[in-house]
Image (spheres, rainbow, N blue to C red):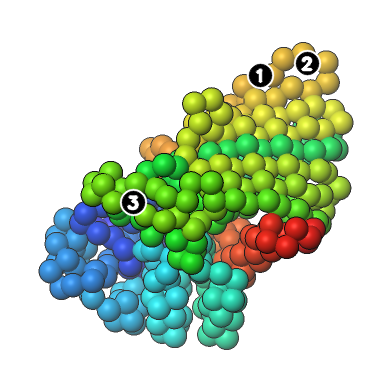
């Protein structure tokens, strides 16, 4: 299955987590790879030979394995994509790094900072290029928003306010995502919707100089509709963060589990010369389903600011696949040009550390 137009020698891709039963590998990575020049899906792994065979036949993939190490060591595989549940990331990433094969891991990279540091350190020692799926940074609208701010649309940024809903972590949870209720598994409101959006915020504005936080688990029991089972939830479903950015701007963020009947994404950036407002139906900014409006100078009302065509370099894809496709396109450009615009494992470590600062601020009540 060749996705290259021929002007770039395709890189052979093997996906860990491309299931015939669906999942993010099939819904996100597969269509993104098909849309981007320079990649060729050649292999996959599954938990059993039968599952591997079924997935390979469904997606027309020539190589099927049950062992991620075998996939990574195959001569036809240049990039291993890890798109499985977070608790399994380490055991699947380490063999690929040991084989010297480039790795793109979904975010969160690991269950916490220590594990992320271990993976980043191994990648550095082995001299392996890495990437992490913080695709908000590659989304056309987020890059446009960053440039508007950098070019002075709002003047000096004074403050930013963000309210978002996680969709998940509400009163019910699907059986396939029940593991997200356990904070120890690392796939939480904090790390996924909040984590993705926070990474875009720091890209557009700056990092945090200081941070204070309050978190809570307000729904301690959640229901699994398919089985009627009730689960104990230890992951936080309320996150309130305030702090000062490195730029001096004041930031206030509130994420809540579930969905709201009113506001599910509202991000305001207020400056000396104008204002920018991002709104959408989900707090998962990485899905790219939102609108940018702005006003400055003598404007009295906000106007829609369409994303210029030059930011959309992958035709024929819509959200949420577009952000993933643009991340692949930027990764391919990085490889060809020697640049590093796509976040790697070292960046993932820094982002894990920021989330850890927020967690410690909430646990201790001490500004970090």
Residue 300 found in image quarter: top right
For residue 323, the mark is: none
Q: Which residue is mark 3?
A: 230
Q: Is residue 322 above or below residue 135?
A: above
2 vs 3, front mark = 3
Q: Which residue is mark 2?
A: 299
> Residue farthest to the top?
300
In-front residue for pair 150/1: 150
Give the percent coordinates (x, y) of residue 202: 69, 51
Q: Decide: marks 1, 2 in contact (CB < 8 A)?
A: yes
168 lies left or right of 153 = left
Disc 1 is placed on an element classified as: strand
User: CA separation, marks 1 and 2?
Assistant: 9 Å
Return the disc, 2 or 3, that comes first in the chain's sequence. Answer: 3
Category of crowding for the residue at label 2, using alpha-carbon neighbours closer than 10 angstroms: few (below 14), some (14–19), many (at least 20): few
Disc 3 is placed on an element classified as: strand
Q: Which residue lies at the image location 38% right of the left edge and 63% below the top edge?
A: 85
Q: Which residue is mark 1?
A: 303
Give the percent coordinates (x, y) of residue 4: 35, 55
Give the percent coordinates (x, y) of residue 243: 78, 49
């Amino acid at each position: 299955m060749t996705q290259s137009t021929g002007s770039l020698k395709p890189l052979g891709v093997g996906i860990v987590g491309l299931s015939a039963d669906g999942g993010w590998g099939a819904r996100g990575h597969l269509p993104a790879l098909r849309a981007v020049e320079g990649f060729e899906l050649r292999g996959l792994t599954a938990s059993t030979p039968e599952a591997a065979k079924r997935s390979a036949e469904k997606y027309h993939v020539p190589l099927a394995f049950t062992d991620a190490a075998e996939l990574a060591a195959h001569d036809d595989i240049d990039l291993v994509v890890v798109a499985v549940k977070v608790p399994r990331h380490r055991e699947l990433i380490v063999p690929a790094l040991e084989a010297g094969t480039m790795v793109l891991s979904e975010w969160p990279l690991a269950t916490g900072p220590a594990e992320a540091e271990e993976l980043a350190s191994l990648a550095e020692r082995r001299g392996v290029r890495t990437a992490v799926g913080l695709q908000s940074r590659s989304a056309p609208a987020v890059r446009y928003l960053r440039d508007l701010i950098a070019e002075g649309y709002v003047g000096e940024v004074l403050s930013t306010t963000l309210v978002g809903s996680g969709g998940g972590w509400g009163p019910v949870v699907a059986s396939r995502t029940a593991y997200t209720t356990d904070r120890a598994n690392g796939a939480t409101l904090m790390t996924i919707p909040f984590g993705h959006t926070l990474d875009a915020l720091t890209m557009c504005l700056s990092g945090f100089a200081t941070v204070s936080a309050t978190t809570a688990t307000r729904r301690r029991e959640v229901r699994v509709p398919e089985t009627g089972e009730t689960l104990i939830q230890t992951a936080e479903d309320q996150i309130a963060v305030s702090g000062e950015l490195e730029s001096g701007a004041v930031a206030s963020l509130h994420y809540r589990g579930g969905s709201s009947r009113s506001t599910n994404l509202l991000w305001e950036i207020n400056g000396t010369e104008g204002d920018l407002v991002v709104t959408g139906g989900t707090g998962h900014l990485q899905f790219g389903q939102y609108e940018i409006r702005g006003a400055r100078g003598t404007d009295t009302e906000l106007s829609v600011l369409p994303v210029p065509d030059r930011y959309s370099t992958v035709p024929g894809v819509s959200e949420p696949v577009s952000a993933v496709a643009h991340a692949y396109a930027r990764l391919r450009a990085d490889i060809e040009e020697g640049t590093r615009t796509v976040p790697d494992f070292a960046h993932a470590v820094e982002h894990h550390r920021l989330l850890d600062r927020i967690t410690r601020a909430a646990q201790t009540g001490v500004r970090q």
